[in-house]
Amino acid sequence: MRFLFALALLLSLAGCSAPSQGSSLSASNALVWGSIGDAKTLNPLLSSDSASSDVIGLVFDGLIGVNPKTLEPYPRLAESWNVSEDGLTYTFTLRPGLRFQDGGLFSSADVKFTFDRLLDPATDSPYKDAVQYLERVEAPDASTVVFHLSKPDCSFLLTTGFGVLPRHLLEGRNINTAAFNSHPVGSGPFRFSEWKPDELIRVSAFDGFFSGKPYLDEIIYKVVPDNLVIQEQLITGEIDLAGIEPEQVPRFRQNKNLDVYVYSTNNYTFMGFNLLHPFFRDQRVRKAFSHAIDLEALTESTMLGYGETANGPLSPVSWAFNPDVKPPAFNPDLALGLLREAGFADSDGDGVLDKEGKPFSFELLTNKGNKQREKAAVIIQYYLKKIGVQARVSVLEWPTFLDQVNRKRFDAVILGWSLGLDPDASGIWHSKKAGKYNFVSYANPEVDQVLDEALIVPGCAEEKRKPLYWRFQELIAEDQPYVFLFYGSSTVGVNKRFTADDGILASPLGLLWNIERWKLKPEYAE
Amino acid sequence: MALTRYAVKRLLGILPLLFLLSLLSFSIIHLAPGSPASTLLGEKAFDPAAVQALEERLGLDQPLPLQYLSWLSRVLSGDLGQSIGLKPGYPVIQLLGERVFPTLALSVSSLLLALLIAVPLGVTSALKPHSFFDRFFSFLAFAEFSLPNFWLAMMLILVFSVSLNWLPSSGMADPRLASFSWPDFFAHLLLPMVVLALGEAAALTRYVRGSMLEVLQQEFIRTAKAKGLPSHVVFYKHALRNALLPLLTLLGYSIPGLLSGAVLTETVFGWPGMGRLAVNAVFSRDYPVLMAEVLLFGFLTLIGNLVADILYACADPRIRYEQP
């Protein structure tokens, strides 16, 4: 009986080995976006992983957006805004007639609700720092929102681009666990339609979108958990858009069905020292490391020509970037000299430097799953060995890695930071703002002061903030609390069928900043 | 009715075992370094204060025995809780439930296919041991047994999806299709099913061959032959029936495997199965999901063993479960 069933199954399989030709397609101008991971939550307040943020970006929209070329804010759901002279009050006027995807009216009360939830200590949001100086939000009438700050904060404006939640669906619910988080309603260009866990998330064009209905009918966010398979599916056409590995770029460029986009991203990879470590407390040791490693060779072999050697804590994408600070020159002799000066010598002749009887051997920690960091660790190990320093590379899965770092049980780590569009980097470098991301325990009063000052510049004019950030980058270069390795870039493959109004434009914001204006090329449209 | 009493006794024995299993797994899972905050908080997870606040809210700052007791009392009242890492707030039961169909579809179909391959090959090999046929398939079985599944999967994708473009390479359904269609589903099922089935068939073939050879040595076969029965009746009626008995036991043991999923194959083929859920739960320290999976697999393993023992007793009259 069982065997009969198996036989029937097998026969039915034999009859259908060709993939589903002739079946009805739901939407011919759907875009299939490949992702290695599934989303965790579709609530913009709670998401921290890239898959969740990708989908949230399609479903939600905020008061302001960012211009892909200038990286300056511009009005989106807000029509206009102004900032009071003391920098403490931000007033936004909303566009008239906005609606959520469920038909509910979009008003200032929704904006107030969203930011109130962000301020609520019971909300598990990773974005609390963004509103650290926000005191309260008012909605005096349906189309006006007023933000009151306790202290001027030049980085605040960009925060108002946050996806707005519909109050009518979430009022009185527990925001951390609401069912809304897995079938969201926003006011962005695409309406959520289904989520098949570990398989796909489907969104479809929202005809009430403020700038008109998107051209594409559907976007399918498809989970393909294996990187190699993602790449092959770009070739077979099962996926239309996905990130690709740098080493695959030449092969994809030759494929006549694909376009490859390469763009700089606003992030950097670094080797960070535990500044409480007796050896790394000495600035000469940190400087020696930066000269011992051939940073250009390291960048080339990890990023394969798609990265840029880093020189400091801001990326060239930012207006506040200081190009006068140069990456440390590769000079092993200089490095060795600095270490000697710091009291290191190979006194027992075992090929490893030592000081006061302790050999210079340390653990270099990084997280599993990031190939570039793992490669960089091994390269650094190689260069340090040449000057007599022993680095023991250890690759840990993320939760364990974080646990070690947060308990300060580490010597040095390789990690990367994704930066916000505002150059404020207090979270990483300020010594007083109670242990945020400053896990290396860096403390320089002048850096603290410069960062504080740059946040409260009256009028927040770039030309007035810029000199302060330039100074900040010089100070960091002097202290070398990190060895800055490289600035990142993204390489993305897109099926040639797609274009956008004015063409597809890669920017540090990514490719999809104008997804509502993406469409099929006329020769592919039906 | 010794068998019924035996079964009831064994069933009652499962409860303390499950309790011990949950206690042990709970301790081990919670002793592993890291917390769900590491994946929930993004970069904010570098802020120990933020991590602590989240752990307090999730009750993870409580002493471990207390956490275990509150988990246990919830489970006993039928509530497996909510996910805290993979899909915060989502009911665990629903998260598991969504995986049942894909997991069973893949595991049952591949087990059937494996049997379809293994039984005829094993039997034929045993009929003429050390013949060319026997040696050839022994070689194939060992070769397949030593191939890693993910490699075989990748090769099949390269051939059948990329080069020939006959079959889809991942997922359960073509996302561009408007509605579910069985032919499309089977097209997606085919490659992962074949990969899993080949691996299982390699082991099963050897098993069937060995078992068949053993039976053929026995005296009742000689008797049957001596009676002058045609050889096909001897082989396929007398010998095969007896040789397949131990296979029943093996099927009992494979019950937990049917639902636990196959992590690597699921990952390469993007199959939304139970194995991937378990692994992702480990990486995001989703304790409630992990504990639910441990309970489920533990329960199925114990039940599977029981079923195997009972099947064996039913099939083989020489085995009796009697009260001591």
Image (tube, helix red, strand yellow):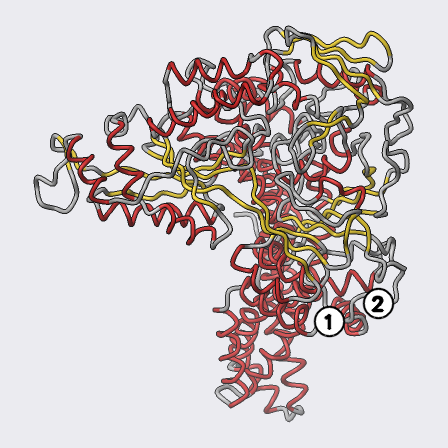
**Residue, disc 1:** B166
Chain to which the residue tagged by mark 2 belongs: A
- Say which amino acid is labelled 1: Trp
Q: Is residue B156 left or right of residue A64?
A: left
Report crowding for label 1: few under 14, some 14 to 19, many 20 or more residues within 10 A (C-alpha): some
Residue B245: image location, x then y, percent: 61, 68
Taking the spot 49% from the left edge, 47% from the top edge, the residue there is A307
Taking the spot 50% from the left edge, 69% from the top edge, the residue there is B145
In depth, the one of A295 and B109 nearer the eye is A295
- Say which amino acid is labelled 2: Gln
- Tell me the element at label 2: loop
Residue A459 image-quadrant placement: top right
Taking the spot 71% from the left edge, 39% from the top edge, the residue there is A513
Report crowding for label 2: few under 14, some 14 to 19, many 20 or more residues within 10 A (C-alpha): few
- In the rendered image of this protein, does residue B52 appear above or below residue B134? above
Whether residue B246 is visible: no
Residue B90: image location, x then y, percent: 70, 32
Taking the spot 36% from the left edge, 18% from the top edge, the residue there is A444
Q: Can you tell which mark lies on residue A200? A: none
Residue B122 image-quadrant placement: bottom right
In depth, the one of B245 and A126 nearer the eye is A126
Residue B298: image location, x then y, percent: 57, 43
In depth, the one of A415 and A253 nearer the eye is A253
Q: Is residue B117 left or right of residue B183?
A: left
In this figure, what is the number of numbered marks? 2
Chain to which the residue tagged by mark 1 belongs: B
Q: Can you tell which mark lies on residue A21? A: 2
Pointer 1 with pointer 2, Cβ within 8 A = no
Whether residue A117 is visible: yes
